[in-house]
Image (cartoon, grey):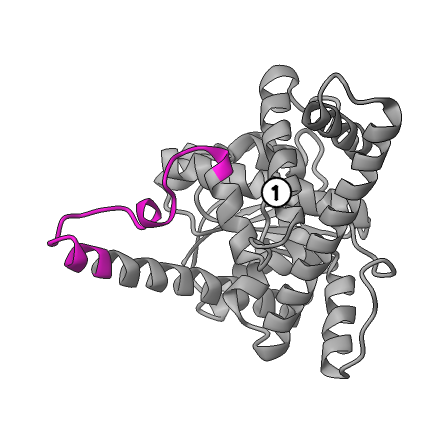
Amino acid sequence: MNFFITDDDVTVRSILAQIIEDEQLGQVVGEAEDGSELDGKRLNIKQVDILLIDLLMPNCDGLEAIQKIKPEFKGKIIMISQIESKELISEAYLLGIEHYIMKPINKIEVLSVIRKVINHTRLEQSLYDIQKSLSNVLQGSIPTQVNDQVFHDDSIKSYGQYLLSELGIAGESGSKDLMNILMFLYTYEKEYSFEKGFPALKDIFEQLASEKLGDAADERDVRREVKAAKQRVRRAVYQSLEHVASLGLIDFSNPKFEEYASHFFDFSVVRSKMTELKNETSSSYTSARINVKKFTQALYYEAKRLMQEKKG
């Protein structure tokens, strides 16, 4: 495995490099002291598999750097910081990081996280190789991309449907509402970008309800549809939480669990749901601490990432 370390503290870079090389996890092929020095294409040229990057840096912080190098950079990203802000950590996961390491550097934690990411990367590559080999056999040894078997077209809708299936809610009534939200965000970003942040979910629900009911609908009908759509979406997100938690309960190293648990949910909520399932207790979705905003944003960014990777 090839590693690249970005941190404005030379001591931290030295410690991480020493851990990686002493434990024979791979080799450090480059270092940088600020996010402004990173370029996705150059990282790919260096064949970087894992980028370790600090959250807080003087000129270009970790979040800005990740946004800059995506989608060119194809490797995995591990964020490092002493900041414990849930909002910043959540934003980092939404941008596509694999894991988060807290400072001060703890060797045991570093080894655990890096090994987990390495295993995940190798598993993904193995599955890709197996699917590619099967595809070549089934199609008369004609090379083809694995994703072509999964996605019928290059629209973000196709990738969104794939993710909802992966999350175990493709058949839920709220999945249609989630797809409508996904398409709304895609159109919105094209027209206005997200420079001022995502539009409020309340505004999205109202806009979609108005479009669904048409001009003849009055304000009361729109409010009723908004309420119903919110309930459908919340129920779907809760079902997805149960699905992901059950995967982790059976096998904590399950690739889908590792991929989706922290991206789509607050991990403390996933842990709580796993405990409920283990103890065979239950709670209604109305009382669960479900973050619909986090889920919809993660759905959009992940669908967009998959689409851009295939095009790239």
* Residue 114 vertical position relative to residue 64 in the rendered view, above or below: below
Q: Which residue is most to the bottom?
A: 279
Q: Residues within 10 Å of mark 1 (few under 14, many from 20)?
A: some
Q: Horizontal and vertical percent for residue 148? A: 31, 45
State the residue position of label 1: 176
Look at the image and tell me in which quarter the N terminus lies. Answer: bottom left
What residue do we see at 64% from left, 29% from top? 185
Q: In which quarter of the image is residue 240?
A: bottom right
Q: Horizontal and vertical percent for residue 47? A: 37, 46
Q: Closer to the camera, 58 or 139? A: 139
Amino acid carrying mark 1 in the image: Lys
Q: Is residue 34 visible?
A: no
Which range is magenta? 134-157
Q: Quadrant of residue 197?
A: top right
What residue do we see at 80% from left, 35% from top? 226
Look at the image and tell me in which quarter the C terminus lies. Answer: top left
In this rendering, position of residue 132 left or right of residue 185:
left
What residue do we see at 23% from left, 61% from top? 134
Q: Quadrant of residue 67?
A: top right
